[in-house]
Amino acid sequence: MKQITYILILVAGSWLLSGCTNKTAKVEETPVEENIVRVSKEQFKAVGMELGSTESRIFSEEVNTTGYTTPSPDGVATVHTLVPGIVSGVRQSTGSYVSKGDVLFGLGGANIINLQQEYIKSCSELDFKKQELERVKKLINDEISAAKTLLPAKNEYTIALSERNGKRTLLEMMNIDPEKVENGNVFPTAKVVAPISGYITAVNLENGQYAEPGLMALKIVDTSKLKLKLNVFKSDIRDLLPGQDVVFYNPDYKTNEHRAKLVLIGKEVDPVSKTINCIASIEDGTAHNLINGMFVESRIITCRREAMALPEKAVFDSETGNYVFVKTGEGADYVTFKKLDITTGTTNKGYIEVVDDKLENVLTEGGYYLTPGE
């Protein structure tokens, strides 16, 4: 039995005569060979039809996830005061960039002065205990004192040395030079400096404030050391391996993609979200453009393979599967196409995998106008 197929006829209105091009098409039924569509060359050109072939494309299998940026352990620091004191010299604010060693603020008050005075006293005490130990040793060598007197003198010297070193270390941690203090210089304020380079993300103090040691004064994040913390459903974990590529982006700017590598796969399911935390390291040169705590959408590339493909717009759906239009011939003023069923696979970036052998002369543009009902 003969099948009914379609001949494409371009509809032109009165406005077409004024110089506009109408790409609307009308389909009329006519008895022709089975699954064959005939298009005039004028119509072929008017609706912008183009021919192409299957081509090799890279297809990837992906796991879609969401997550957020977070600093690595060495990329974040909170700044605290070691002793109580009065804050002065605060210049930075949220968003300011600081380098490691930059002065963040000063800390003054009686505690700062007392600490330096105690250090001077401990230095004097150490000198005294050292001289006493040397004296006892000499008396023992001269057989004037018993050997048992050496142990108490040595213990007292060790205690004095420990106290001096402890206060010296504390001064160094507060960026006060112990050598200058030992020479009689007492400084009214200690300098609190940045432990790492990065951007200040929190400021919790102001000039004149009395700061306690438990107070978080500032927080610094090095955005060059950000990483991704991704939430992966447990059903997708079996496909993941360290070293797989990750593509991620801000949902508000999906075209601005960044790259990362999967480095750690969690071993515990979150009881609330039912997901597993995975960590990805962001490629060099990318992280500094990002913001700490930014929500991201990502694709973890679990597999890459090469396959033959066509543009998605060249492939159409029917009740029985997918099909394309393939050019089968042409006459003086027309082109004929055959509706060809094909087997397809996955899609990726506007292309669809074609499992069949290589196809030539496929209608890759304008096939929409040949489909029934259009």
Image (cartoon, helix red, strand yellow):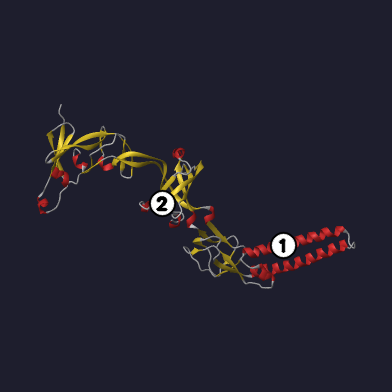
Marks 1 and 2 sit apart, C-alpha to C-alpha, by: 53 Å
The foreground one among 191 and 225 is 225
Whether residue 264 is situated above or below residue 140 in the rendered picture: above
Q: Is residue 184 rendered to the left or right of residue 191?
A: right
Judged from this view, the residue extending furthest toward the right is: 144
Q: Measured from the top left, where is residue 280 in percent x and y? A: 47, 48
Which corner quadrant of the image does residue 207 belong to?
Answer: bottom right
* Disc 1 target residue: 163
Give the structural element (helix, strand or loop) at label 1. Answer: helix
Instruction: Sort mark 2 into few (<14), some (14-19) or many (20+) by Cα contacts within 10 Å.
Output: some
Q: Based on the displayed image, in which of its 4 quarters is residue 153 positioned?
A: bottom right
Residues 113 and 34: in front is 34
SS label for mark 2: strand
Q: Residue at image x 42%, y 50%?
A: 259
Q: Residues within 10 Å of mark 1 (few under 14, many from 20)?
A: some
Residue 293 % position (x, y): 46, 54
Q: Residue at x 78, y 61 (%)?
A: 156
Please report whichever mark, 1 or 2, sits nearer to the chain's N-terminal start.
Answer: 1
In this rendering, the answer to whether 329 lies above or below 175 is above
User: Disc 2 residue type?
Assistant: His
Quarter residue 245 falls in: top left
The residue pinned by badge 2 equals 258
